[in-house]
Image (cartoon, rainbow, N blue to C red):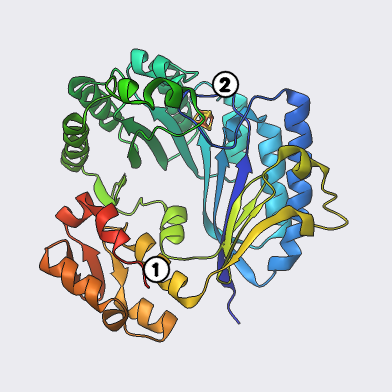
Amino acid sequence: MSKKKLELYVHIPFCEEKCNYCDFLSFKADDSEKRAYTAQIIEEIRAQGPNYSDYLVSTIFIGGGTPTTLSGIWILEIMNAIRESFTVATDAEISIECNPGTLSKSKIMHIKKAGINRISFGLQSSIEEELNELGRIHTYKDFLQSYQLAREYGFTNINIDLISGLPKQTIDSYKTTLKRVCSLKPEHISAYSLIIEPDTPFFDKYGGEEGSLLLPDENIDREMYVLTKNILREHGYERYEISNYAKPGRECRHNIGYWTGVSYLGLGVGASSYLMNRRFHVESNYKKYMSINMKKDITPLYCDLEELDINANMEEFMFLGLRLTRGVSVHEFNEKFGMDMFEVFDRQIKKNSMLKLMEYNSPYLRLTEKGLDLSNMVMSDFLLD
Ligand code: SF4
């Protein structure tokens, strides 16, 4: 019997400094803490592996935080534990998030040795003033050095993350960043708009009415969104998801799995999972996570178990799948749920097709260009009563 497909997400919660806009589960830590966490997550991996012997791991994503704040040897140890405990496909896509300024020759050698074949750089902007305002630890020059190092060591699948709508950002400065990044020819670019999250220094500064006036206004934000699409298209990047662009064949397999409902298991503090129609996450209190005896009992690891009923599953299939520019497969929906998509979402499909926000191109139902621009509005329509 062929094995089921599983994606792994490995959370490393450490960063050199906390960025001003960040609400992820990440914090500063010394080497002994990082060493202890590495040992604990390896125990978790070893305890979990046997529960997934009928799965084949198709992708692994080591994210954070900044996974590359760990030493290269610890990253290698984590990957070795995964390979010993799970069955990893020979062609698995294995990504690591990396902050420029945290990469050395020795580290990149270990990353390579660990079989990691994709690097995702959090650049965000190429303009020093904007990087300073974000509280990033690196300069654009640091990024260039890290990027060249990755290329020198043979990494042929690289993503660069960018953010638009930043304080002090102008159309010209954003254009400069897009053009600089394109000239480096990474295989993949993620371009998101800044979101001001509660409980961050940015929220205190820009979250209120007065503060928000210091950010690029809606029209500029819109212009940046259009600029992203146009400049990246001119440079041969295909938009395959609302905020993600890739050279042909270089789409992120891990994220596509997430948007198309492939099962994934989160490992490490706070990591989320989706398996057998259930969502749950690992204990997100760091102290509690570290105190769990993984050899004895891993049940205290899991929190907020949510069973998704058929309606919730169908809604999610639509919300996530419509993020992809190819859309959702009608055949896949009908097969998975034993129902006809055009009957279940009759009202929504008719209404959004009439408004030219959606179109059917067999076997995919997808958002039009205009629908992608208004995706939040269209998707909110797909809630079932
Ligand atoms: S590097 Fe990433 S995870 Fe770390 S603080 Fe900055 S935005 Fe957050």
- Up the image or down, 131 lies above or below 120; here it is above
Q: Is residue 148 visible?
A: no
Depth check: give the residue in front, 34 or 145.
34
- Mark 2 CB near ligand 1 (8 Å cut): yes
Residue displayed at 59% across by 53% down? 272
Mark 1 = which residue?
315
Q: Looking at this view, name the residue that lies furthest to the bottom.
A: 338
Q: Point out the frontmost of discs 1 and 2.
A: 1
Question: In the rendered image, which residue does mark 2 sit on?
Answer: 17
Q: Is residue 14 visible?
A: yes
Q: Looking at this view, is 196 or 236 the one in front? A: 196
Using residue 242 as the reference point, say whether residue 146 is left or right of it: right
Mark 2 surroundings within 10 Å by alpha-carbon count, few (fewer than 14), some (14 through 19), many (20 or more): some
Q: Position of residue 177 (x, y in %)?
A: 27, 25
* Residue at the image point whose x is 21% and y is 76% from the top: 362
| Crowd class of label 1 (few under 14; some 14 to 19; many from 20; radius 10 Å) | some
In whole angstroms, how far apart are the C-alphas of marks 1 and 2? Answer: 38 Å
Tell me the element at label 1. helix
Label 2: element kind: loop
Which callout, 1 or 2, points at the residue further toward the start of the chain? 2
